[in-house]
Image (tube, rainbow, N blue to C red):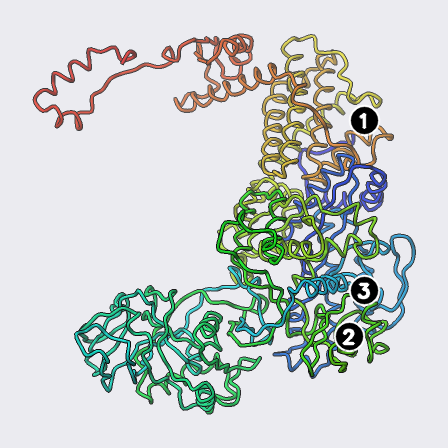
Amino acid sequence: MSFKNVSNKVDFVTLEQETLKFWQETDAFNELRRLRAKSSKRFSFIDGPITANNPMGAHHAWGRTYKDLYQRYHAMQGKNLRWQNGFDCQGLWVEVEVEKELGFKNKRDIEQFGLEKFIKLCKARVLHYAAVQTEQSMRLGYWMDWNSPDELRRLSSMMKDDPLQEVTIQGANGSISGTVEQVVGMLGLPEVGGSYFTFSDENNYMIWKFLKTCRDNGWLYKGRDVMPWCARCGTGISQHEIVTEGYFEVTHEAVFVKFPIVAKPQGSSETLGVSETPRVSEKEALLIWTTTPWTLTSNVAAAVGPELTYVKVQHEDGWTYYLAKEAVKNTLIGKYEVVGNLKGEEMIGWQYAGPFDELPAVVDAFDEASYSHRVIAWKDVGAEEGTGIVHIAPGCGAEDFQLSKENNLPVIAPLDENGVYVAGFDWLTGQHSQEVAEVIFENLREAGVYYRKQRYSHRYPHCWRCDTELVYRLVDEWFISMGELYDKPREEVTEAEKKASLRYQIMDRVDKINWVPGFGYDREMDWLRNMHDWMISKKRYWGLALPIWECAECGHFTVVGDENELEERAVEGWVTFEGHTPHRPFIDAVKIACPECGGVVDRIKDVGNPWLDAGIVTFSTLGYRHHPDLFQKWYPADWISESFPGQFRNWFYSLLAQSTVLGDEPPFLNLFGYSTMLAEDGREMHKSWGNSIEFNEAADKMGADTMRWLYASCKPEQNLLFGFGKGDETRRRFLIPLWNVYSFLVSYANLDGWEPDSKQFSVSGNQSPNRAHAELDRWILERVKETAVSTRTALDKYDAEKATQHLEAMLDDLSNWYVRRSRRRFWKSEADMDKQAAYRTLYQVMVKFIRLLAPFIPFTTEAMYQNLVRGIDANAPASVHHTLYPDAHADELDQRLLDKMRLAITTASLGRSARSAADIKLRQPLAKARVNVGSQQEQADLQEMADVLAEEINVKEIVVVSEVGELVNYKLLPNNRVLGPKFGKNFPKVRQALMALDPAEA
């Protein structure tokens, strides 16, 4: 049976569509699962869930390529895998998009619309985009236990219509029935199969268990703190969510303001040659600077650096100012004179008048605390920006709030959850904090304390979901304590200290993990050393219902650990809740009895930080609660992979923290991280910039295999520049040369009527009678075995880039050396033993090579395999992805032959380069080429390969020389410009002496 004819011109996108259809018709993926189901070897992978909220981008395909590549690789080693994709479902990312669809502006719109309706739309959106992303992932060639996209769309539509209508879906072992809400809540369970969804009942209840364990250990607490706050979304933003990626470059109207000094109490001295208790002039002021004018309403103190040098400046405007010496030039305008110097510590305790002391909220706060504005010390004050005197508003800044606790300062909190001034702020009450800058400036002018303003560009935190600039608010939130960071080396931390600190327990887990790239270990440890307590609450609607029931009477709070405990504790509302998933609003109906005072207790209305959802999946998806046998089988995961810029503090951290609370082992053994995708122009991808590429566009124009090879061959620790130009270069560099070799084999085999022995694909048969040809055949067979060794070694270390380098080098040797040097053997008319050996060799190499390539480019290799193997032998595995990955051992290789041919290839390349450097075309024959190599063995090898080399570089003779000097002519030329001035009148003698020397000896 001959091969199916192929063209040397290939449309990879069409080929991929045909292959997708073939996989579907043959049920290729499920057949692979059946083939490996009973294997005792396992590879456990936990997928970092993709947010099912929009179509996939090209950047998602990068990470999913790695995931598919390594799962296919381990499956081809005969291992059993779980093959479970994950969808992230809950949180602001979904809520904000649903709000946009509904035209909502803030949280009040949601409450007026109704929580029940809003939540079902969030669920429906997730199901819809899960279907979209499932189809896109399939297009990428990503093999997983996918739900039917049509079924997901059906569930999405039914969820919108009526979540309580009955539905039946096909599960892993039979039909699953229930209301739409109930069935959707079961998605991802072992009995249902398919992708896991973080909105599932099991995922939510597993987090309940985690939080109850935190409560039992004393790590869960309610805290009052100043937190980053999104006024549009009406919720706090945790430190995890805004570090690095949450900051954007913005320009604000910064303002310089005078704080008139009213007293310099006993003990403070300017060291200006004045009396011990300095006299205060009528127009003396501290000069401060702020980029957030709205916070001036809540000022309570001014901070100076105790060791900084400050100056007293008399200005032509009649005022005397105090500011840091280093800040004078960048701050003051007009004429002024520095009349004195003092240290910051000498200013501590000075009292001043605030800019808005007349506001009722300020009056009440100061009266209650018997307080007046004063100067305090803060070691972190610098003079690099501003005036070196920092305005402190504890109700408007996290560091300010900490200083208030250290210095017993009153706290004035001016804003409500919408970023609007609350009652007590007089003419500002009801105005939005982001819209009052000019009004405040005008008020400062009228009060005579305005100095000047400036446009100031800096990095400022934004909401990671809606891009709104954040404010800082004093709020009650729920936290998990990370424990103290001890001021001593980690190895000196005692077991008792470690037991009290979740932070150090997590560090011990980090030690047990293999981090790729290696700097991932350092980044995770750095995060653990510097992170604050984990804020887990959100004042939103769609998400984990925090299982915390807080008593309004006595303040005691109860954490419920699962659905059974909730039913046992419920004193009201269970009937309303029963049959629903543990989400708002139905979970809010359940009330329990306070175990301390007996009062009836409501659940707090907060939902959970979405990283709780993703971090619990090593437990919820592996059957921790109900399938201990499965959990024992698959935990911990052998490998996880995600983009690392943000995940050290998000998913990686969340996995580590939750597994540390619930168990003794790390949740994964190997972690592979990769960087960020940028556009070809090196900028971030943005639709408005015209450089953004959606996944569908890339797959349709570039082809999935081109994308996959581009992804796999890049340096994962560096940002990837992605675009159609990069795709074209990748296709030209690898896929087209690969196809050319394949089409060459098929075309000439069909022309000659050559067919492989269907029963003996790996048997070499008779060798070519031509000694050189026989050696060439043996070499390429060894070369593909060597590639199998090196590729396996790289993939075992999760180094796809190195693996692709080995595979590209193999293709180069196959195409540009073996095939090129063997073409005459295929071209000749007689079908002699030499020609048969060439066909047999090239065929065997190609079959093995496409198996090596299969995890990387599954479409192209499948098409080649079906033609070269399956089309010849119906008993061969039905898919290339059902075969085993080629195996070889380094100690079995004919290293002498490999070294000999590598030397010949390198020498030929150097010879052609020498011709090019001398501008002598290859077609022009030369008399001889002289070659020097280091060892006697290499000299002997070159002598044996002399005829081949002579042909390659078009010379009549190859001369192997033992000394490199035989290849080089030396000439000594004195550097007149250097030696002339140095030797002066003696230089002619020096030059003459140099010219008399033997250049080679010199």
Q: In percent of the image, x 44 and y 80: which residue is there?
A: 294
Q: Is residue 988 above or below residue 267?
A: above
Looking at the picture, tell me which residue is in the foreground, 990 or 828.
990
Residue 735, x across and y down, in percent: 63, 36
Q: Is residue 59 visible?
A: no
Residue at 68% x, 71% y is 607
Q: Nearer the viewer, residue 302 or 143?
A: 302
Disc 1 vs disc 2: Cβ atoms closer than 8 Å?
Answer: no
Closer to the chain start, of discs 2 and 3, is: 3
Res 477 → quadrant: bottom right
Asked whether disc 1 touches disc 3, contact meaning CB atoms under 8 Å apart, the reply is no
Report the residue marked by disc 2: 587
> Alpha-carbon distance for marks 1 and 3?
53 Å
Separation (CA) of disc 2 from disc 3: 14 Å
- Work out whether 453 lies above or below 507: below
Q: Which callout, 1 or 2, points at the residue further toward the start of the chain?
A: 1
Residue holding disc 1: 2
| Residue labelled with disc 3 | 185
Mark 2 Cα within 10 Å, few/some/many (few <14, many 20+)?
many
Give coordinates of residue 21: x percent, y percent. 80, 46
Tell me the crowding category of disc 3: few under 14, some 14 to 19, or many 20 or more residues within 10 angstroms, Cα based.
many
Q: Which residue is drawn at 73% across and 38% down?
A: 74
Image quadrant for the N terminus? top right
Number of residues whose C-alpha sits closer than 10 Å to that of mark 1, classed few (under 14), some (14–19) or many (20 or more): some
Q: Is residue 732 left or right of residue 360?
A: right
Nearest-to-viewer mark from 1 and 2: 2
Q: Identify which amino acid the numbered label 2 is placed on.
A: Ile
Indicate which disc, 1 or 3, sits on the residue closer to the N terminus: 1
Residue 36: x percent and y percent? 82, 39
Q: How far apart are marks 1 and 2 (CA)?
A: 67 Å
Question: Type of residue at label 1?
Answer: Ser
